[in-house]
Amino acid sequence: MSATSTAMEVNAEARRILAVSISKLYASRTQRGGLRLHRSLLVSLVMRSARDIYHASRESEAPGAPTPQEPMDSSPSSEEQKQLPPQEAEPAQTEPQCALSPAPQTAVEAEECACDSEITEDKENMSPAARQSRKRRSKASAAPDFLPSKRARLEPGEERYAAPLGSCRVGAAETHGDLHQRVPGHSDDSGWVKTTEIDPLTGTRTETERPWKFEGETGSVS
Amino acid sequence: HLLPGPGGDMQWCFSQVKGAIDDDVAEADIISTVEFNQTGELLATGDKGGRNKNQPQFRSEYNVYSTFQSHEPEFDYLKSLEIEEKINKIRWLPQKNAAHFLLSTNDKTIKLWKISERDKRPDGYNLKEDDGRYKDPNSITSLRVPVLIPMDLMVEASPRRVFANAHTYHINSISVNSDNETYLSADDLRINLWHLEITDRSFNIVDIKPANMEDLTEVITAAEFHPLQCNTFVYSSSKGTIRLCDMRNAALCDKHSKLFEEPEDPSNRSFFSEIISSISDVKFSHNGRYMMTRDYLSVKIWDLNMETRPVETYQVHEYLRSKLCSLYENDCIFDKFECCWNGDDSVVMTGSYNNFFRMFDRGQHRDVTLEASRENSKPLQVLKPRKVCAGGKRKKDEISVDSLDFNKKILHTAWHPQDNIIAVATTNNLYIFQDKVN
């Protein structure tokens, strides 16, 4: 039992770090002076480590073992510090993979967008996996529950991430869980964007086209 | 353990403090760089508001000599980016005549400033009135030579060169070459070589930008020319490596001559291992035989002849290793601490939190923690060594890790090139301490 709870602690820690990292990346886009490449790189490295640990610990928990994260009919376990709607647990397992695999590239993408006009054209040739981050998710494939989101609310009695030192706070950026990019040159509201969606489990690609809508900076960052 | 005296036989005393007293810090007043000139006669500070302050030494006191606005905020319309006016680095040029020259840089543009004194003015022109209007030629009947008469000392700072448009990414370092003709500037991915006289051209000598930005794994964090060999420079990376390059080898120094890297201790592995191994500063010793690097938790001294590991490692605040997650959340883990050598390379210094700074005496194997605070700022008051209690029972006068103020950080310190005088910058105050013996 102790092995499982340690794995769960690691899992919870990894998820927390992932959430914090994503808010940092998001917040850095509105920073004065432009995106800091060094900082974005470091944050994305942390995210990658956390993501790997998260998946490793999920895999070790997953097959058959009765864990509190098993979905469907169990109510959120008291061991979970964070809200975990049962019906979203299964998609949540696969969601992080598509939300987060582009993340290290996202940091670089965002910096690339902002700082280097000479490689704007490379964005056209970017791998589909990287561009996935722009895709707005439909309600069916909702954002991972642990990411800061408009829908996330604390149950009464639950606490936010405890932070013992100084004035550390988890940036509570209101996002939809995906990271919109402002593509240079797209200053008008027209135009179509082709996106490729990769199913994380099977690897199959689906290409869709949808009208591009210019996104302003969304959400408030604390 | 008992030490006969902190930091060797040095006893540090308060000398001066400059800056606002109140806790409400204006963003523009945040000190972003501190640098003595080669003689120690002048001390320059740069701040977030783009201002440079120069203070000359007079009877062991530094007083403001000139303040000028080095950089203004700019807007890059093409990229929709604001360019901060914050001064990232100042480097003095060796003095060649009565005037002083320094290089000052923000994220994108380097400027060469001339600081000169004017204490005389010409009086009595032959052809002009005192107010500058030309006299009627017919009214001039005699020859007259202007004389220089004394006036109140005026210190003028004028920009002599502007080195712009050479950096796509944010400039983190500038370094003047020992040849006194060239200097380098480094951003996250590239290093450029400039001639001090030529502003419309620079040579790119290091380029680590990958063909595909998605493959980016490391960035350049600091760079410096060797103090004696004009063909040699080093640059540090976010992965904790230092590369030494020889400009005689090739025009583009992408291939290093030496690679300094210490293998990571696997027992210390954590989510944040990569962040804390990122080097925030690299400085050659004055004699050019060693270099020092600063990463988040330690200072390392490298012998230029040995690439496999540093010859000395000093822990600055090892008690923070267990707090890395919280320090990540509150962004402190991204703080870039600088480090510096004393004049004879026997002691090194770097900053920490709670307005503490640390000195490591290499020869005597002693170290000390001191604090820059207004409470200890009576004239010539001797600084008492401080101690942080990492865990367990806290002794009297010790501070526990959880009581440390992480908003009070000392990122920038400078040591006078000859004497035991140090300049320590807290967020918006500049402290000057000197050795009692001085």
Image: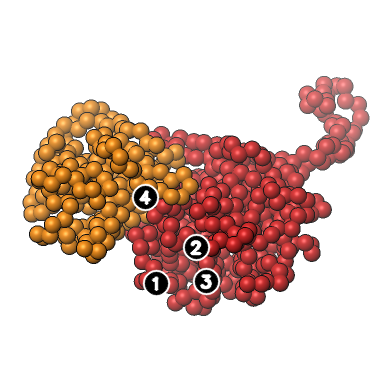
Front position in the image: B371 or A137: B371
Specify whether residue A138 is in view.
yes
Q: Is residue B251 left or right of residue A197?
A: right
Residue A47 screen position, x and y as percent: 30, 54
Residue B67 screen position, x and y as percent: 68, 40
Secondary structure found at label 3? strand
Q: How many C-alpha atoms fall within 10 Å of the one at disc 2: few (<14), some, or many (≥20)?
A: few
Q: Nearer the viewer, mark 4 or mark 3?
A: 3
Q: Distance between the Cα atoms at labels 3 and 2?
A: 22 Å
Which residue sits furthest right?
A: B142
The amino acid type of the residue labelled 4 equals: Ser
Chain in orange, by letter, is: A
Q: Which residue is identified by label 4?
A: A40
The quadrant of the rendering that contains the C terminus of chain A is: top left
The amino acid type of the residue labelled 2 equals: Gly
Q: Is residue B79 left or right of residue A127?
A: right
Front position in the image: B60 or A53: A53
Q: Is residue B9 left or right of residue B356?
A: right
Q: Which mark is residue B391?
A: 2
The amino acid type of the residue labelled 3 equals: Thr
Instruction: Kindly identify the residue that appears in the image at 73 percent across and 64 percent down.
Output: B11
Chain letter for mark 4: A
Chain letter for mark 3: B
The amino acid type of the residue labelled 1 equals: Asp
Q: Nearer the viewer, mark 1 or mark 2?
A: 2
Looking at marks 3 and 2 on the same chain, the residue that comes earlier in the sequence is marked by 3
Check the rendered structure and report the hue given to chain B.
red
Q: Distance between the Cα atoms at labels 1 and 3?
A: 13 Å
Q: Nearer the viewer, mark 1 or mark 4?
A: 1
